[in-house]
Image (spheres, rainbow, N blue to C red):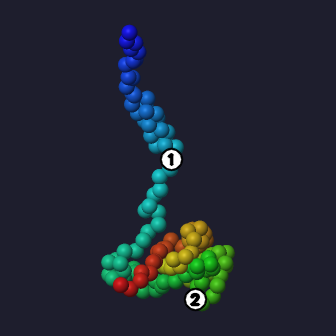
Amino acid sequence: MQLSRHTPPRQLISLVPMIDVMLILLVFFMVTSTYLNLDMIRVIEPEAERAPTAPASGDATTLLVRIGADGQIHVRGRTLTAAELGSFVGSRLQENPLLSVVLLPSSRATTQNLVTTMDSLTQAGATRLRLMRLEAAR
């Protein structure tokens, strides 16, 4: 006597539920995510630095603000806090409204230090802000 077991047909795995879940997740993340506006921080290209444009009047000057690796703000050899920087730049802007401020952060400075410095400069009224980055010689 020969006994044979009846094998049920093998069921196929349907991909439709997985695709549905992926589409729901895609819509969810598209609706809830925020997108960065990378044009908010202007970066000077090296080609643009080589061809400087002349200011409208001859009394425009540039102020270099350095941000150290420890987050300290240095202007003309003096260490300033964010509030002191704002008052210093505000007084300089009253003397010269065309003052251009160039920020030079250290490569080890945090982004928060950069944003705090930029915030204090804009609150002081500086509108001509530039961000500069030094590259190693090749």
| Mark toward the viewer: 1 or 2 | 1
Q: Is residue 1 above or below residue 15?
A: above
| Badge 2: residue crowd in 10 Å (few <14, some 14–19, many ≥20) | few
Distance in Å between CA atoms under marks 1 and 2: 42 Å
Q: Does residue 119 appear in this view?
A: no
- Decide which of 81, 59 is in the foreground and name it: 81
Is residue 46 visible in the rendered structure shown here? yes
The kind of residue on which mark 1 rests is Ser
Tell me if mark 1 has few (under 14), some (14-19) or many (20+) residues whose alpha carbon lies within 10 angstroms of its own.
Answer: few
Q: Quadrant of the N terminus?
A: top left
**Res 134 quadrant in image:** bottom left
Badge 2 element: loop
Residue at the bottom extreme?
77
Residue at 38% x, 86% y is: 137
Label 1: element kind: loop
Q: Residue at x 63, y 88 (%)?
A: 78
20, 77: nearer the viewer: 20
Q: Position of residue 116 (x, y in %)?
A: 60, 69
Q: In the displayed image of the protein, which residue is found farthest to the top?
A: 1
State the image quarter where residue 4 is shown.
top left
Q: Position of residue 93 (x, y in %)?
A: 56, 79
The mark found on residue 108 in the picture is: none
Report x, y in % for residue 3.
40, 12
Q: Name the image quarter holding the C terminus.
A: bottom left
Residue wearing tag 2: 76
Viewer-closest of 126 and 137 = 137
Q: Amino acid at mark 2?
A: Arg
Q: In which quadrant of the rendered view does residue 124 lie?
A: bottom right
- Which of 24/102 is in front? 24
Q: Which residue: 47% across, 74% down?
A: 131
At a point 53% along the width and 79% down the height, the residue shown is 106
Q: Which residue is mark 1?
A: 33
